[in-house]
Amino acid sequence: MNELVERIRREGKNLGNGILKVDGFVNHQVDPMLMDACGKELAGRFAGVGATKILTAEISGIAPAISTARHMGLPVVYARKVKPITMPDQVFLTLAPSHTKGRMVELIVSPEYLGGGERVLIIDDFLASGATIMGLVRLAQTAGATVVGIGALIEKTFEGGREFLQSLGIPVESLAAITSMDDGKIVFSDQ
Amino acid sequence: MNELVERIRREGKNLGNGILKVDGFVNHQVDPMLMDACGKELAGRFAGVGATKILTAEISGIAPAISTARHMGLPVVYARKVKPITMPDQVFLTLAPSHTKGRMVELIVSPEYLGGGERVLIIDDFLASGATIMGLVRLAQTAGATVVGIGALIEKTFEGGREFLQSLGIPVESLAAITSMDDGKIVFSDQ
């Protein structure tokens, strides 16, 4: 999607080691108009998958998931990383590696809001190694739900997430695909 | 706001000790259409304050802040509770008590996205004791910004946050005000 690619070109920073800083419009400061345009685009791409619910992970997944959900008229569930006191004792829990924390984090969903028969669309900010998204897939499958699609704002194709998720046999979409971040550059797939 | 009050009446749960569970539409599962209506209402109430930026705290503040921001055409900054690796070494940091964690948590904002001259509207999901919101006020003031308004989806008037914030002399708005949660009830201010 041109609007997102251009914004990354203009304001994204390559911090080295494959780390892309988009804190000015996605991860710390959010541009709600850009996020709305991204949500509309993702909603269009997944219009035909018959989703009944959108699943994401706190924290940075919330904005793109809600924007997409509003355009699809669907509820969003965001997996928590710390179990709040309002959640029942029995939950769905899986572990996924955190890039920014350098350790495993928990992804927790209450059975109240994810159940058998749901058709789940997973939306996140980044598709990198695919490990966090695969954690969300496991949560959905444990709940007896069917994952029908995976969408991300930004894909780092060089981290192999798309191949990792390929065995699921469902559509995987991203709005800006970065093929290389070597030598301080940010190379997009359409270059 | 009727739509939110009715939803709390229907689906909110009084868990005791002043804890209101709204996990089905605000805190874990989010209803993006309700959130959009709340954002529109808050945007209307603060249309005249001349805000240039919306400030909130992760995690549950993100959805209402972004919805409000979209209707006002403003960027959102959400204070982080753990400093990500993409953030510079020098940050604005304050401590605020966490109800759900039972301890103090850090609220961190990068100076890149909050600066002198900004007119900051603070939006959060709950206004209870006002401690988290006062933490955001301190961050904004430390950055040299002016706080011009405070808005929350749900106010628990019996926790005194509004009085605590009164000395700031700025408008404080909430969309559903709960005056009592004694005896398992949820009593709204319009009852």
Image (tube, coloured by chain):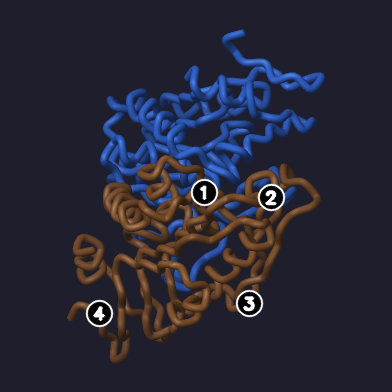
Chain colours: A blue, B brown
Q: Which mark is residue B53?
A: 1
The amino acid type of the residue labelled 1 equals Lys
Residue identifier under label 4 = B189
Visible in this render: residue A115? no
Q: Nearer the viewer, residue B44 or A168?
A: B44
Count of numbered badges drawn on the protein? 4
On screen, A137 above or below B111?
above
| Chain to which mark 3 belongs | B
Residue positioned 42% across, 86% down in the render:
B17
The percent position of residue A103, horizontal first and vertical second, equals 72, 51
- Callout 4: few (<14), some (14-19), or many (20+) C-alpha neighbours within 10 Å? few
Disc 2 to disc 3, C-alpha distance: 23 Å
The percent position of residue B170, horizontal first and vertical second, equals 46, 68
N-terminal of the pair, mark 2 or mark 1, is 1
Disc 3 to disc 1, C-alpha distance: 29 Å
| Chain to which mark 1 belongs | B
Report helix, strand or loop for mark 2.
loop
Residue identifier under label 2 = B110
The percent position of residue A119, horizontal first and vertical second, equals 31, 40
The amino acid type of the residue labelled 4 equals Ser
| Chain to which mark 4 belongs | B
The amino acid type of the residue labelled 3 equals Arg
Left or right of A73 in this view: B156: right
Q: Are marks 2 and 3 on the same chain?
A: yes
Residue positioned 62% across, 15% down in the render:
A188
Question: Label 2 near label 4: C-beta < 8 Å?
Answer: no
The percent position of residue B133, horizontal first and vertical second, equals 53, 68
Q: Nearer the viewer, residue A83 or B75?
A: B75
Disc 4 to disc 1, C-alpha distance: 30 Å
